[in-house]
Image (tube, rainbow, N blue to C red):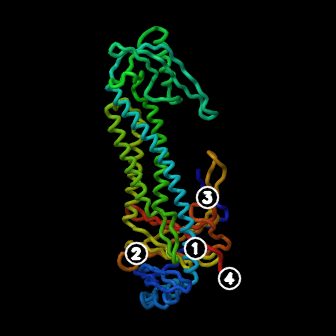
Amino acid sequence: MSETEQSPTTQSRTPQARTTAGAKGVPATANAGVLPDPQGEDCSLEPSLTACGPEAEAAAPAETGGAAAAGGVGWGGTAAGPPPLGHAACSCYNARAKEWRMKNFFRLLGVVLSGLAFFAFGAGMGAVTLHTLWKAGQMRGWDEVPARVEACGLESQSSGSDGGATYSVSATYRYTVDGQEHTGQRVGLHAGSDNVGTFQQDAYAVLENARASGATVPCRVNPANPDDAVLFWDPRVEMLGFYQVFAYVFGGAGLLVLFFGAFAGGGNTPENGRVRMEGTNTHKVFAVVAAVFALYAVALVWVASPILKFAEIPWWGCLPFAVTGIFIALAVYFWSRFKKFGVSVLELSPCPAEAGRMLRGTVHIPRALEAGLEMRATLRHVHQYTSGSGKRRSTHKRELWKDAKSATVYLAGGEMSVARVEWELPPGLVSTARRNRNGDWWELELNAKTRGVGYKAVFAVEVGQANP
């Protein structure tokens, strides 16, 4: 269970963000290279991303022509563009990134093991379903002979205060194969006790009536093993549906946890003031889950078609295909957004941000978007905590600070667009945890309406204490 609470102190205003003007506002920090770091850190940079050190500050106006050349206004009303990231900041930030990677490795290991455990349980229930249907198909070819019930009973067991009572029918019967008498005790295709439907009570009523009247009941006998017999050989549709709940809920949850953890790699670790957007592999996760569910649905149809008639399948028998279709639709949607916009990168200055001081951000979008496109940028500080335990365990998210602005998209040459925003951060609100984990964390969300799939990107923002 998860809920988001809005703090009464949350800010909600919509001033225009400061942006570089002009039809083609090329970022003033579009230099690239590898700069030596006094702390021994590697500040390797990708093209069009800010470098660390004074060399970047000197090189930026020369390489880009400066914002002033285009007649625009840069950060803080100057033409120099955003201030460069210093060596000390990069060194400190990269050291923290290494520490995060180590912690994320163990967290990722735990996430993968948890996902495997959930998926194994769901896959086990799916395997039971397929085996049950396969066994029912085999029993359709067994020999049918009359059987005389000698004894039968209905046992009731309490399964706790929440689950109610479960029932189990038992019987002893005799039948003859090739002149030789055999004794059987298997009643139905599904073994054990349960309270799903009324099969146990109905079967007991039939068997007790046959025992009391001396009538015979039909049973199916394995021709390869006459000692193997069953009285009720048809699969219970309600029990198969019960299996599917566990197969899809636990199997689906396990796959999502497993692949989100594996593809995310423990989260996006910021380096050199750059942060990749969250959820870059979402389309892959949903595609994998959809593929697994599709294979399972095909297997269900293949095994069940010789046994169950279409008219015998209840409406919820189509749910496996509906769930598969939902995951396919999600995979297509997120793939379309990924294909249209690529992976955006947020460039922070300073790195990390400092509480009580200015935060400047440049979002690099590897696609040529429409010039002048208005984006909605929302920066929020969230406190996340977990309360309760067991079934009453729930996670809460409370926004302690929030501010929304408009940011204009500018073309940066080639297949590249940029959007810039800046905030004056409130004092004292620092990051104590990674995004979506218990503690305090910051995130930046950008949205824009475009034809077809809209743009959306979420970034984890690290905010520390201000240096004196």
Camera-near label (4 vs 3) is 4
- Three-letter code, disc 3: Lys
Q: Which mark is residue 468?
A: 4
Rounded to the nearest angstrom, the CA distance separating label 3 from label 1 is 25 Å
In front of the other: label 3 or label 1? 1
Q: Marks 2 and 3, Cα distance to the nearest angstrom?
A: 36 Å
Identify the residue under disc 1: 96
Cα separation, mark 4 vs mark 2, equals 40 Å
Residue 25 lies in quadrant: bottom left
Amino acid beneath label 2: Ala
Q: Disc 3 marks which residue?
A: 397
Q: CA distance from mark 4 to mark 1?
A: 20 Å
Percent of width and height locating residue 351: 56, 78
The label on residue 349 is none
Contact, CB < 8 Å: mark 4 with mark 1? no
Query: Which quadrant would residue 231 be assigned to in this image?
Result: top left
